Image (cartoon, helix red, strand yellow):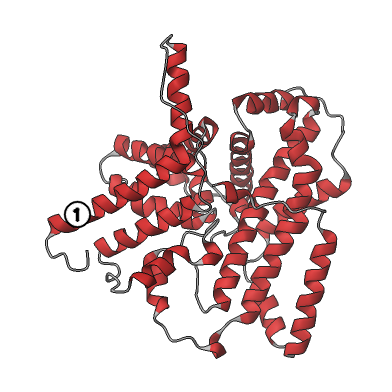
Amino acid sequence: MRDSKSDRSRKNIITASVTINLSVLGFFKYYGFFTSSFNDMLHNLGVQGGIPFMEVVLPVGISFFTFQAMSYVIDVYRKDIPASSNLLDVLFYVSFFPQLVAGPIVRAADFMPQINLKPDIHNIQAQKAATLILGGLFKKIVIANYLASTIVDPVFNNPSAYSTTDVMFALYGYAVQIYCDFSAYSDIAIGIAHLFGFRFLENFNHPYRALSVQDFWRRWHISLSTWLRDYLYIPLGGNRKGKIMTYRNLALTMLLGGLWHGAAWNFILWGALHGGALAVERFFKEKFPSAKEQSVFGKIISTVLVFHFVCFTWIFFRSVGFDTASAFIASVLKFDFSVQLLTPAVALTVLFGIATNFTPKHWGSIVQEKLSGLHPVVQAVLVGVALMLISVMGPEGVAPFIYFQF
């Protein structure tokens, strides 16, 4: 593409590149899903035979590095960055290890210009990196793993066996677990990148304080939501082709976003629910433009409603299938308020996890400033003590990050 002069040749190159990337992603990640779905449809219609099924091993991090590869060719095509003359630079960008497995998805336009910058060891923000890494480890090991082992996994494995109270706290617990788990990986990846002199944009910004579903997606997995917006929603037409097409583009973008997360119908439903909510919100904002300003009470109500909508959709995201999701919802509606799994420690952990979404954003900077003012030996001792405490406070065993499966 670097040497291509005509628009037609550039379009042919980008079409071929995106097609190849999506084909690779589609085969490895969705072959089994579409094959089994198609064969089930044929079986229900009474048709014998079907597509042969093969066991396909899913490469680690394929969803992330294929999106980054597409980001490179699209950014070059759009002339946001010049095409690199060094193939190793491109391969380095696609395979940079901190965020390779579970993100964040780093844009080529953000990463490539940093490759050729001369490293300055005096400009390495070690305190910021340490704060991000330690905070991420705490969220993952102490909060996410604890909630998973004590209430989330037992309830979602057999929701019919538990009361409404346990099931609801398992749902709130999963909302905290997936936030702490995924934002922890992002923080650790961003922190490690800082140690190598690379700057990544933040991937989470207090998502559970969102006032709308649109606001939630401006705060949750920001690298994916902005990728889908800039590389899918806007090229589809965005909001430039009328209301109906805007609603279609929102729904299609979120459907594909759901499918990106996993090759299963429950992920598609999860994306459809968010797409539908975005379309409904847009409809009411256009219908009642004067209702944009909210009182403090109105903001509280909006935050509570959005949080519970997001939690409801997490049921389908976490469940292994619709049977589990249906059993979970049925248990909620039993209105049995007895307690089997819920303990004060679990309840406090859930409340603490939710409360962290309402802390001032600058608190992290204050910690970094305080740490940077200490003697390097003291800094090293504090980091070591923090690592030891996190290890002691966390449950036994090694729990993989949730987004490793995507």
Q: Is residue 287 visible?
A: no
Residue highlighted by disc 1: 11
Q: Amino acid at mark 1?
A: Lys
In the displayed structure, 38 sits above or below 11; it is above
Q: Nearer the viewer, residue 46 or 236?
A: 46
Indicate the secondary structure of the residue bearing disc 1: helix
Q: Nearer the viewer, residue 48 or 318?
A: 48
In the displayed structure, 95 sits above or below 8; it is below
Answer left or right for 214 relative to 132.
left
Q: Is residue 326 visible?
A: yes
In the displayed structure, 220 sits above or below 95; it is above
Answer left or right for 241 relative to 127.
left
Query: Farthest residue toward the top?
Result: 46
The x, y position of residue 362, in whole percent, is 63, 71
The image quadrant that residue 315 belongs to is top right
The x, y position of residue 154, in whole percent, is 78, 36
The x, y position of residue 253, in whole percent, is 40, 42
